Amino acid sequence: MRADYHRRQARIGYVWHPALSYAAAYTIFALAVKLSAGTATADPIAFVLMFCIGALPPSTWAVHRGMQRRSLRKGPSVRWHLANSVSGTATLVIVMTTVGAYLVDGVTILFALLLMRLGVIMMAPVLDLVFGRHVRPAAWLAFMICVSAAAYGLTGQSFAALPPISLTILVTYLAAYAVRLALMTHQTKNRDRAARGDWFLVEMMMTALALAVVCLIIFVGLASTNQLSTLTFQMPSIIAGLAYGYALVNGTLIYLDWRENAHSVTINRAASLVAGLTASLIGSVAFGFIWPSSDQWVLAALTASALVILGWETLTALSHRSGDLSFEDEQRRDPLELSAESEL
């Protein structure tokens, strides 16, 4: 019994644990950034500063923990190369466009989330196919459901009334994700733990550095114009940054799973869908946010069905495979075993 438990944790624990953390953090982020929308419009510089101040500790902590674990194992220094540097740049674009998507006036949390999630879900099996990875039938079924959802959404009033800025943000977001996931798939979605650790650390280092530089530039700019005294403390913006930084750390660990994108993207998008639905309900009841329209709930249901199909098929396939392997064999086969924290 104990061996079966450890074997199950070796297969899925390192993914589902960060997924739950990701869902909780993303719920807080979505609510906090919507509550900050008014401030962001009135004083965008202050919003950006507070958000970056909040997001800096999680990324810095991730870099510290990663370097600490590497030092304890006496591993090599972090290997920087063009691919992980470009991926880190794409990650920064994703951070900016994600925040921007939720700040557009009149666009609900659920709708903004669905726009971004549908695109990435549809992207996953295509990238697997391009890079010669096996794509399970369930992934193609989920892909077709998402295409149907997108087609349905295009005929709905929500898409027709979408402001041009939202379309620009969406296109930029999906382009950045295509670059990031393509580079990950080609370079480091494999069983080499050191390579995955390098990739994670480079992305987190670049994120932390960019956040620190933005904070410094804003502080210097305000000080040089004698406007520091006018700066107001904005707790929702700081909370939004803190929650997003924590979600980014866990989301990156999920994406770096060595299995196909149809698996890792499923886990990540399922967690964010749960977060979006939760944030929409809480925001509507507690803070008076716009209640999502009926066509947005239909889109959510279609997206959820695609995720359920992929998730169920993945766990069923893993369960069948585990019956043919001893715990020791599986440990040798999957070097990415115990938890997300052991990645680094």
Image (spheres, rainbow, N blue to C red):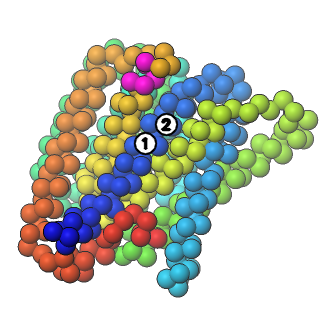
Q: Amino acid at mark 1?
A: Ala
**Residue denoted by label 2:** 28
Please name the predominant secondary structure of the magenta segment in the image.
helix
Query: Taking 17 as reference, is 86 left or right?
Result: right
Q: Is residue 311 magenta?
A: no
- Bounds of the magenta span? 281-285
Percent coordinates x, y for residue 105 in the rendering: 53, 20
Q: Is residue 236 left or right of residue 117?
A: right
Mark 1 highlights which residue? Answer: 24
Which of the numbered marks, if any, corresponds to residue 316? Answer: none
Q: Residues within 10 Å of mark 1 (few under 14, many from 20)?
A: many
Q: Is residue 109 above or below residue 192?
A: above
Measured Cα–Cα span from mark 2 to mark 1: 7 Å
Residue 331 position within the rendered picture, expressed as x and y whole percent measured from the top left = 25, 77
Q: Nearer the viewer, residue 197 or 187?
A: 197
Give the side of residue 38 with respect to residue 324, left or right. Answer: right
Element class at badge 2? helix
Tell whether label 1 touches label 2 (CB within 8 Å). yes
| Three-letter residue code for mark 2 | Ile
